[in-house]
Image (cartoon, rainbow, N blue to C red):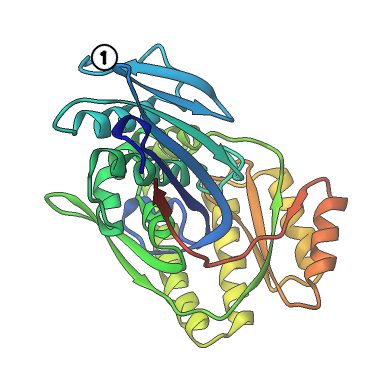
Amino acid sequence: MSSESEKVSKASAPGNLFFLGEHAVVEGVPAIVAAVGLRARVLARLTQSSAVEVDSSFYGTESARLGEEKNLEHASIPLRPLLRLLKQVAESASKKVGMKATIESEIPPECGLSSSSATLCALLAASAPLVDLRINPDDFYEWLYPYQVEIHGGKASGAEIASTAFGGVHRVQKVVEQTTTLLRRKLDIKPLRIVVGDTLVRSPTREVTGRYMRELQEKEPALVERSFARIAALVDIAERAIIEDDLPVLGECMNENQRILRDELGVSHLVLDRLVEVTLQAGALGAKLSGAGRGGVMFALTTGVTQPAIAEAIEKAGGKAIMVELGGPGIEATCE
């Protein structure tokens, strides 16, 4: 049995893909989001120090002292929300305790696979048990939504938090009343074969969501409203297609959503467009970007027969093909 100072907790959480609805979901339009089989992993432990420390395989190491109300400007932008979250957990204990969290991830950052949401969920799931905080998956949204808003540059839906926390495939919709909440409905889905294509072009979400989309809404409000209304209608059609296992219709919905993202909202990219084009030529039922866009990843809905050819087409076009499982488990945690 470990002593209190030796207590260690581990957690992992999946990334996500948006079948439909990214960007529009920020403004209360429904979306369909699925957990994928790439995970962020966190090992957290108590320390004898009066500080919290985050050690990330992608972003290095930063620390912050407990009890100090500073904005953590010394830390790199990606590590600030992680430090704040770990600090919030540590300071919620009856007796303030130091903590260290070590983060490893299979999810490339800034690629549209929700690496930040996976990391936030895994960090909270790993650190909370160390101070006897009981947080169930339904509470993760309330805890983590403010941090996602910070990461996304001032606007976010939190849809990825629900998908990451629970796993599976969900229809999600943000509702803003006195507080921001998220409606979710889990969709029973048969196994789908997809191939992710990484453009290897990185695009920070805060630049696309927090700056570009805000400016577009200010300049072209009617265009954005019409586009989001069409996306909402596509989500309804796609949900029925998923329930009925109608993959051609689901693929058509993905293609139309991609057209709106590319031609009307302007969040695609030449490399994304190329990977979408070659996968459709190779037999994909549908293909689109996922996440913020302007780089990052796309994914193609395939049949078992076309999957190898589609992966080969992505590689030949200069992208990286990633085979992932879809709709797997959400947060998994153990405390020793």
Q: Position of residue 132 (x, y in %)?
A: 23, 43
Q: Residue at x 46, y 38 (%)?
A: 43
Q: Nearer the viewer, residue 308 or 201?
A: 308
Rendered residue at 32%/20% (across/down): 48
For this orientation, the residue located farthest to the top is 74
Quadrant in the picture for the N terminus: top left
**What kind of residue is marked 1?**
Lys
Q: Residue at x 25, y 26 (%)?
A: 97
Residue drawn at (61%, 47%) of the image: 268
Helix, strand or loop under label 1: loop
The answer to whether residue 307 is left or right of residue 188 is right
Q: Which residue is identified by label 1?
A: 70
Q: Is residue 320 left or right of residue 294?
A: right
Query: Which x, y percent locates residue 214?
Result: 39, 38
Q: 176 left or right of 328?
A: left
Q: Is residue 295 visible?
A: yes
Residue 153 visible at all:
no
Q: Which is more toward the observer, 236 or 170?
A: 170
Q: Residue 4, image x and y in percent?
A: 29, 34
Is 89 situated above or below 336?
above
Residue 166 horizontal/vertical position (percent):
39, 62
